[in-house]
Structures are given as structure tokens and as C-alpha cells.
Image (spheres, rainbow, N blue to C red):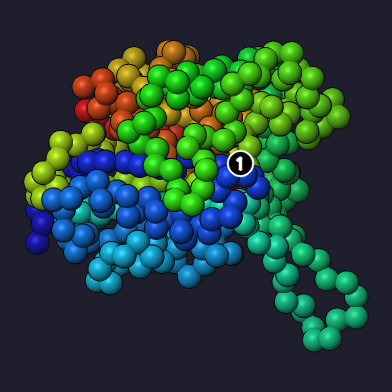
Amino acid sequence: MNDRIRDVYIVDAVRTPVGKYGGGLSRVRPDDLAAHVVRTLVDRSPELDPARIDDVFFGNANGAGEENRDVARMAVLLAGLPVSVPGTTVNRLCASGLEAVVQAARAVAVGDASVVLAGGVESMSRAPWVLPKPERAFPAGHQELYSTTLGWRMTNPRMPAEWTVPLGEGAELIADKYGIGRAAQDAFALDSHRKAARAWRDGLYDGEVVPVPGTDLSRDESIRDTTSPEALAALKPAFRPDGSVTAGNSSPLNDGAAALLLCDEEGLRATGREPLARIGAAAVTGIEPQLFGLGPVAAVRRALAKSGRGFAELATVELNEAFAAQALGCLAEWPELDPAVVNPRGGAIAIGHPLGASGARLAGSAAHQLAARGSGTGLVALCIGVGQGQALVLER
């Protein structure tokens, strides 16, 4: 019986370039995207016997299409890992990839596993349309198809209407709550693109981004190097006629996958590698569904308190940018946090937000940043549709 909690290390982390909706990765199945990052991660640790992998945790927010029937297990098989390696798929919507990392780390920490893979995948381009079965046989009327790409569908009529507003309307509510105007949102979006473009030019993603075979995509496809305040200001509001949330200050629809290798000390020795970072405390919290964008606020404070850290100690923060208004609303609730450490290599408005993959992408990016610094504390946080927030602290 295990009588102690074990340290959990992030040994490596990789991701695909993030593709646009209908873009460079749209012809690649999500299970193949997942298999690619799994295979690459294993190949980058040649001293590790793949048969030593105790489990594979993968996040996915859809599950209705080609990633059905447990995409984690499918990725294991498609990647050519031993059939003895199991896999499980988890869904916490936009934080599914981070949930996979947290669950994997927990399994290692309590001694249920020594070596695990964790990650996430989403192909929003290939998300299917679904047709519910009719309540009665032989319906005479038309039947309605639902897109599973994003947001509420087949909503339970018992849900209060204010809970089930579109995600963009939720961002508008946060903009109203904090008085976040269009100019501030556009400036935040512009900064995201500029930081992401600079990070790519400086080679900061070279060690973690692994192009997908058979595609021509070598860089995140949604980054707009040449966008400007004027170009962003010319866009029309997307959710209210007089609103401030636009396509330009929101994250796009995307495709991609990411994966991390997690080990305890024994597993770390088996890899023969130096870890990027160590897993710290995690937290998840709930909030009113329409204010989902503020979900990280309480989750971050809880994770920091559990880790004994404060905002001033954070060397880097990877905060998912579902919307500029949402991110700015969270930052308004953390006045102690230095904005300069937030998303230093760009955020989801520029890089993209392939739902189930994003949490793993953020965790991997934070780990690589801490390794590049040599020491420090990092934080990963995401808002989650239907009103949740999740956060994870990393140490180096």
C-alpha cells in the first residue's frame, strides 16, 4: 500500500500546429492527430520502453464524430504502442486537455501509475452534424440536424434561459459587468497576435510543435502577423448589433492535438531525461453558466492557496483566451497579477482554441517556459462552458 504522495514530473510536451477551421489540418481525423502526438512523445524518449506506460488520458470535448469510442485508446493503437497500454477519454469541455493532465498526475501521485501520457485533441472542422432519434416512429414532419462544432445543442428545456445564452453573449455580459470596451478588447487581441508571431519568429515553439505528416502546416494557422488596430476595428459585432465582441477579439474555431509525458521519480529514471517541470496544486470551481468566462477567477485563487504561492511569485501564466472580454474580466479580478507574465508567447485568440486540446497545450507551453527559465512557478487556467473554471500550478 502506498503511504505517501509522490512528486509528478512533466518530462516532455508536444503539440501539433493549430489549424484553422477548414484549414491545414481539416483533412486529418482527430484520432490520427492524437496518435501523432502520442507517437512523437514516445519517440522523443528512446530510453523509455513503451510497455512501461501505465495509462493514457486524453481530453476531447465532442466525442460525437471520428473520435468516438474512446479516442485515447484509439490513439494508443494507431500510434503502434503495445496493446497492453490502456487509454481513457475525459470531457470537461474547454478544459478537457487540462483535466486529462490533472487526472493523469493524480494517478501517478497516489501510486496507481508510474508513467502516463496525458493530452487532448479536437477537430472542430470534422465535428459532425447529429440527428436525434424521433420520439415516435414514422415522423411526418421535418427533422432538425444539430452541429456539434461548438456550444449548446439539444438543450434541456428545464435549463433556465439565462444559463443557455451563446458563448459570445456570455462574453458580452462580462464586458458589460466590467465596463470593458471594444478598444480594450481589440488591443488585447492585437497583443496576442503580436506575441504569438514574435514567439514563432524567435523559435520559441521549435521544441514543442511537431508538424503532422501529410500536411503542409508548420505553424499555427490563425496567427495574423499583419493585423492592425484599424483592421480589428473594422469588424462588425458578432453577437449583438451594438456589441463589442467580434470575430477579431474572440478565439477562432480550430483543429489540433497536444500531449505530455508524466512520471514519478522511478519513471523519470527510466526515461533518462531531465524534467521540464513538476506538477503542483490543481483546482476546479463552478460559476453561473452564463458567466463561464469568469470561471478561472476562483479556481486560480484556490490552486495558488493550495500550493502556498501568490500572484507575485508567478513567472508565467497561460490563461486561455476564449474571448478578450473574458480574459480581461479575469485579469480585473486579479489586480495582484503582473499582466506582463500572462501569455508571453501569445494566446488562443492568435494561436487558436481546439477545445479538447487547449488545456494540454497550455500546460505543455508553461512547462517548456519554466524549463527555458531554469526555475520558477507557472500557472495554467481555462474557463469552461456551462460555468466552470480549472487551474493548475507548475513548479521548476
Q: Is residue 266 visible?
A: yes
Is 132 placed left or right of 71 in the picture? right
Residue at the spot 51% in from the left edge and 28% down from the top edge: 347
Is 24 placed left or right of 116 in the picture? right
- Residue closest to the eye, 88 or 372: 372
Q: Within the image, what quadrant is residue 227 found in?
A: top right
Location of residue 138 with respect to 283 vertically, above or below = below
Disc 1 crowd, CA 10 A, few/some/many (<14, 14-19, 20+): many
- Residue closest to the eye, 84 or 278: 84
Farthest residue to the right: give it. 140
Amino acid carrying label 1: it is Lys
Give x and y (percent) for residue 139: 86, 81
- Residue closest to the eye, 177 or 34: 34
Q: Within the image, what quadrant is residue 249 found in?
A: top right
Residue at the spot 54% in from the left edge and 55% down from the top edge: 28
* Quadrant assignment for the N terminus: bottom left
Helix, strand or loop at disc 1? Answer: strand
Residue at the spot 74% in from the left edge and 61% down from the top edge: 146
Count the numbered circles shown.
1
* Quadrant assignment for the C terminus: top left
Residue under numbered circle 1: 20
Give x and y (percent) for residue 241: 86, 29
Give x and y (percent) for residue 361: 42, 39
Give x and y (percent) for residue 223: 57, 28
Location of residue 202 with respect to 19 vertically, above or below = above
Q: Is residue 326 visible?
A: no
Q: Within the image, what quadrant is residue 367 found in?
A: top left
